[in-house]
Each structure stands twice: as C-alpha cells, then as structure tokens.
Image: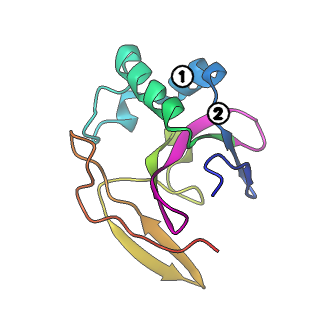
Amino acid sequence: MELQPVLHGPRLYLRPLKAADFDALFAAASDPLIWEQHPASNRHERKIFEQFFDRALKSRGALAILDKTTQKIIGTSRYYDVEGTDSVCIGFTFLTRDYWGGTYGHVHSGHGRVERDGTTFINASVMNESYKPEWKPYVFDLD
C-alpha cells in the first residue's frame, strides 16, 4: 500500500508531507484553539510542534492537506499502524478552524460511525497523553 499517495477531492488536495512544509504547517497549527481539547494542548507552541512534525516525517505516511483553490496548507493527516496489506489506521489529523464543520468536518472528542446516503462517516478516536487511542479504532477494508 502506498503510504503517501496524492489524493484529489473536490475541495482538498493531499500530498506527501515534506520538510519544506514546516513553516506553512506550523502557521496552520499555531492557533491554540485547535488544540484546546486535545491531550497535547500545547502543540501550538513551536518546540512542541517541531516534535510532532519530526515524528510525522519519520512515519513516512504523513500527508499535507491543501485547499485546492488557494493551494494553502490547512492541516495534515497520516497513516500509521500499517499491518501488512490488509489494514491501516488514519489519524494525527488536524485542520485549521476555518475548515471545521460544513463539508470539511472536524475531529473532536465525539466518537462514532454514521452512514448517510451510501457514505460512511467515521469520527476517529482521540488520543490520550501517551498517544494511545481512547477508544478502539475503526478498521475497514480499502478497495
């Protein structure tokens, strides 16, 4: 499975995260309200964010999320816990607050799975201070 694909949606574009993305991604992450309810509530601080960014690069599964219209980096996500070719976890995701809700979604402390008009929406589990899921993650097959 390709862990850093290029993905195109109607509004967003995801591509492999690279070291040169640090400044733009830190600018996106520097809003304290993004992290207010997150276990790493100080991730908006540069030194803490540097650690997050370094781990993302080392994972070789991190993606930069860009707004297709502006080409501005608005967040990140990544694949992790890849087990063979049958399963993968998706997480470590955030979007700037301008993209919360509406058609972009927002990851928060709620947890669940909803099916609507043939589409499955999954709100993934949040992580605790040790970066362990607070709830059992959803696992699904990729076609």
Q: Quadrant of residue 51?
A: top left
Residue sitting at 66 percent across and 53 percent down? 2
At x 69%, y 50%, the residue is 5
* Main secondary structure found in the magenta portion: strand
Pointer 1 with pointer 2, Cβ within 8 A: yes
The residue that label 1 is drawn on is 27
**Badge 2 element:** strand
Q: Mark 2 — residue?
A: 73
For the N terminus, the quadrant is bottom right
Q: Earlier in the sequence, mark 1 or mark 2?
A: 1
**Residue closest to the far front:** 84
Query: Which span of residues is magenta-colored?
Result: 67-88
Indicate the secondary structure of the residue bearing disc 1: helix
Residue 121 in the image, given as x and y percentages of width and height: 50, 71
Q: Position of residue 32 (x, y in %)?
A: 36, 28
| Residue projecting furthest to the top | 47
Query: Is 79 left or right of 67, judged from the image as shown?
Result: left
Amino acid on which the number 1 mark rests in the picture: Ala
Task: Identify the image's colour scheme: rainbow, by chain, secondary structure or one colour.
Answer: rainbow
In this rendering, would 113 be left or right of 76?
A: left
Q: Position of residue 49 (x, y in %)?
A: 41, 23
